[in-house]
C-alpha cells in the first residue's frame, strides 16, 4: 500500500476527515457523504476508512484490498 490513510470519523457537529495518527482534522462536514467526497479528493493512492457513528470501521476504500478482506465484505464497484 502506498500513500496515506485517511479516516472519515464522526464528531460532535457532523463528520471529519483526519489523517491516521494526526490529532487535528483535515476538514469537517455536515454529512458523512460530504466527508467521504473530501477524503477521496485528498487521498491520492492511499486508503479511506469510513467509520460509523459508533466508531467502528464500516467501509474501506482501497482498490488493492480484495472485497472479502474489507469490513463487512463489501464489494467495491469499479468504473467500466
Image (cartoon, rainbow, N blue to C red):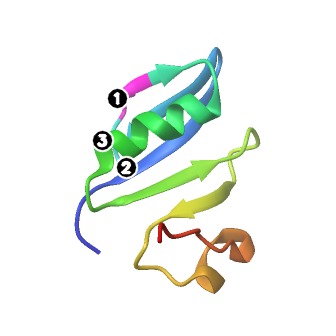
Residue under pointer 3:
42
Between residue 79 and residue 57, name the one nearer to us. Answer: 79
| Residue at mark 2 to residue at mark 3: CA–CA distance | 13 Å
Q: Residue 13: x and y, percent?
A: 64, 14
Residue 48: name its quadrant: bottom left
Crowd band around label 3 with a 10 angstrom C-alpha radius: few (<14), some (14–19), many (20+): some
Residue 46: name its quadrant: bottom left
Question: Is most of the magenta stretch helix, strand or loop?
Answer: loop
Residue under pointer 1:
26
User: Quick check: 3 left or right of 54?
Assistant: left
> What residue is drawn where x is 52% and y is 40%?
36
Between residue 20 and residue 1, name the one nearer to us. Answer: 1
Point out the tag, 1 or 2, that comes first from the N-terminus: 2
- Find out whether the residues at labels 2 and 3 contact each other: C-beta distance under 8 Å: no
| Residue at mark 3 to residue at mark 1: CA–CA distance | 9 Å
In the rendered structure, find residue 20 and report the number of the disc placed on it: 2
- Find out whether the residues at labels 3 and 1 contact each other: C-beta distance under 8 Å: yes
**Which quadrant does the N terminus fall into?**
bottom left
Residue 4: name its quadrant: bottom left
> What residue is drawn where x is 40% and y is 24%?
27
Q: Which residues are magenta?
A: 23-27
Point out the tag, 3 or 1, that comes first from the N-terminus: 1
Q: Is residue 26 magenta?
A: yes
Q: Above or below — where is 80 with respect to 29?
A: below
User: Quick check: 77 left or right of 44?
Assistant: right
Crowd band around label 2 with a 10 angstrom C-alpha radius: few (<14), some (14–19), many (20+): few
Amino acid at each position: 500500500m502506498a500513500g496515506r490513510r485517511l479516516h472519515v470519523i464522526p464528531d460532535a457537529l457532523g463528520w471529519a476527515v483526519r489523517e491516521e495518527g494526526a490529532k487535528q482534522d483535515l476538514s469537517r462536514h455536515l454529512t458523512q457523504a460530504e466527508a467521504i467526497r473530501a477524503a477521496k479528493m485528498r487521498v491520492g493512492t492511499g486508503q479511506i476508512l469510513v467509520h460509523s457513528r459508533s466508531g467502528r470501521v464500516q467501509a474501506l476504500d482501497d482498490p488493492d484490498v480484495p472485497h472479502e478482506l474489507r469490513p463487512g465484505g463489501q464489494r467495491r464497484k469499479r468504473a467500466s
